[in-house]
Amino acid sequence: MMLQSLTTLFALGSMATAAPFAARQAAVRKLLVGGPGQILVSNFDGSSFEIAGKYQAAGTAPSWMRLRPSTKTLYAVDENSAAINQFALDAATDPTPKLATTINGSTGVVFLEFNKDQTRMVGAAYGSGMIDVYDVSTDTPSVLKSIKVEGTLGPEQTAHHPHQALLDPTGRFMVIPDLGGDQLVVLDTKDDKYVISSTHAVFEKAGPRHGGFITAGGKTYYTVACELSNKVVLYEASYTDATIEFKEISQQSTYGAAFPPANATSAAAGELVVAGNNKDVYISNRVSGNETDSIAHFVFDAESAKLTFAHTVSTGGIYPRSMSLSDDEGLMFVANQGGESGLVALKRCNVTGSLRAEPVASQPLKELLAPGMESELLGGPQFVQEI
């Protein structure tokens, strides 16, 4: 009788432990991956990537995308043209993006951002120096207006290059780093007007590319990675009735003092990501001249309003144009355009914010190339995000 009881308890215990384990095994993340000629939907099971669906169109460059889950609508730039392509995508039932329509606006849009209620979408057109505002409230999207970025160009620059449009914490303004004009452009969305309310000069030859907001201690901060100078600049942001004003707090190397690039001339900072804790900041460093490129981790201290370099890890490839945190922020996904690994998952510590050097998973670049891109040095992924 005792033996039967022990056996029963053991069986029940095994079932109790097996069920959560099975659930963990079944949990598969869906990743959206964009690169020259294709959009991929990849399954990530915690230890490996598997391509589940794809849309391919030669000559296109879907280097940035935005998914609106409520309508299962995906918008993808084509930075080689004036097109924004709209797809139907329900990754849970069919991981293959279905092209629905195309919006023609300004040439060379490289970033898309929704407004607060996701009825409007703003595109930063690096290729033509324009800011496009799209009406995406219906199934037939259209361009509401196109705004020309103006002002003094940076030294050795021949055109303005807006590179990002990021919605601020209030949901009213978008901040647009202009790499060609060494400036931050503030776009006011109030009353659906979408007008430039102010510009803020960054230092000469800075090349502001991508930024992020930090809210801490009752204050708002904005930090931006600068591609031409490889500097990360931290500002305190303050609000007026009409715009955002920026007061510089610090600027420092995106590599940290102890890890300079092997080739400072070619080095070009890429993506910047702020974690949900408003503390950890990550910057991808590209074209470093090292065997692989890297991600630098900085830590923001709200009490001193100081951004401090913490550590750096390899991306496992070269030219990491895009990186993003998983939904639970326990992982960092990296898209390398070149090198050995095209797609990498790095473990993130939710306490310290540090990234583990050894990847959780990686996928060879050669498995992520669209047809015809096999001989291209930088033909790999340009975008990655969990959906």
Image (cartoon, grey):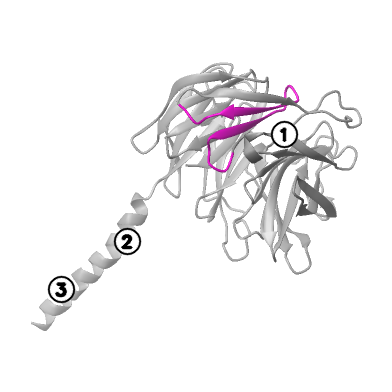
Q: How crowded is mark 3: few (under 14 residues within 10 Å), some or many (20 or more)?
A: few
Residue at label 2? 20
Residue at label 1? 195
Q: What element carries label 1?
A: strand
Q: In this view, does 128 lie to the left or right of 17?
A: right
Residue 217 horizontal/vertical position (percent): 70, 66
> The disc labelled 2 sits on which kind of residue?
Pro
Q: Earlier in the sequence, mark 2 or mark 1?
A: 2
Q: Earlier in the sequence, mark 3 or mark 1?
A: 3
> The disc labelled 3 sits on which kind of residue?
Thr
Q: Is mark 3 on a helix, strand or loop?
A: helix
Residue at label 3? 8
Residue 115 horizontal/vertical position (percent): 59, 39
Q: Residues within 10 Å of mark 1 (few under 14, many from 20)?
A: some
- The relative height of residue 232 versus residue 150 in the rendered view (above or below) is below
Q: Residues within 10 Å of mark 2 (few under 14, many from 20)?
A: few
Q: Marks 3 and 2: in contact by CB < 8 Å?
A: no
Residue 227 appears anywhere in the view? no
Residue 235 horizontal/vertical position (percent): 79, 53
Q: Which of marks 2 and 1 is in front?
A: 1
Residue 345 appears anywhere in the view? yes
The magenta stretch is 115-138
Q: Marks 1 and 3: in contact by CB < 8 Å?
A: no
Q: Distance between the residues labelled 3 and 1?
A: 70 Å
Q: In this view, does 214 lie to the left or right of 13?
A: right
> The disc labelled 1 sits on which kind of residue?
Val
